[in-house]
Image (cartoon, rainbow, N blue to C red):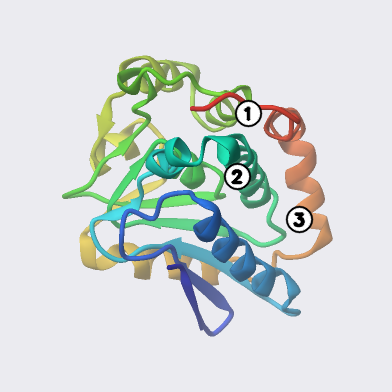
Amino acid sequence: MPSMIRQDDVYILDLGDTENRFNPDWIHSVNTLLDQVENDTGPKSLVTTATGKFYSNGLDLDWMLANEDQAERVLLDAHELLARMLTMPVVTVAAIQGHAFAAGAMFSLAHDFRVMRRDRGYWCLPEADLNLPFTDGMSALIHSRLTPQVAHEAMVTARRYGGYDAAGSAIVDRAAAAEEVRDMAVAWARHEVDKTGDTLRTIKTRLYASVLEALRQPHASPA
């Protein structure tokens, strides 16, 4: 399950050591840790990462199929988590140490900045291969963070981007060696700890107003 430590003024949220899929328990755990970050006063910033092969492998489709009566609720909660990350009142940096697929890739896009391992691991939106359409909110988020050409390729072809290609396509901001990813993200976040609070949240909320509206629609179809 997710856990968190603090290094000076930088919170480091570890998403877990499995596939770190979006299900009720995982989403609740992440939100509880984000509450801790938001409730703390003083300078701060946030890095998210994970342990092992996966950063996040997206929605827990097995759980959703086994709990169809709750599937839409989980999807809406996932949307709200994306919206929350997009408007966190601190600077956020995703340290992508492993695979980031589907909603996990979108979660990384909801951060202010991204650092990705360059030698192994993929960033991918596999919905076209899975025959699952993107929701309006997910589409809006992707289009807000990627160039039109890259968004089109990523969404239509389900291309798997390695670290170098992801950096070259501006999906991530930097590609680094495996042992450097977290340290680079933490150093970046530490440089921005004084940017925190209601002003930053307002800037992000106004910057992504249309995305937030799409993510917070009362109904969503599975993706």
Callout 2 touching callout 1 (CB < 8 Å)? yes
The label number, if any, that marks residue 22 in the structure image? none
What count of labels does the image hold?
Answer: 3
Viewer-nearest of labels 3 and 1?
A: 1
- Dot 2 amino acid type: Leu
State the image quarter where residue 170 is shown: top left
* Figure check: 163 above or below 154: below
In this rendering, is residue 215 above or below 48? above
Secondary structure, mark 2, is helix
Q: Earlier in the sequence, mark 2 or mark 1?
A: 2
Does residue 160 appear left or right of residue 204 in this picture? left
Q: Secondary structure at mark 1?
A: helix
Q: Quadrant of the N terminus?
A: bottom left
Residue for badge 2: 82
In this rendering, would 130 be left or right of 145?
Answer: left
Q: Disc 3 vs disc 2: which is toward the camera?
A: 2
State the residue position of label 3: 200
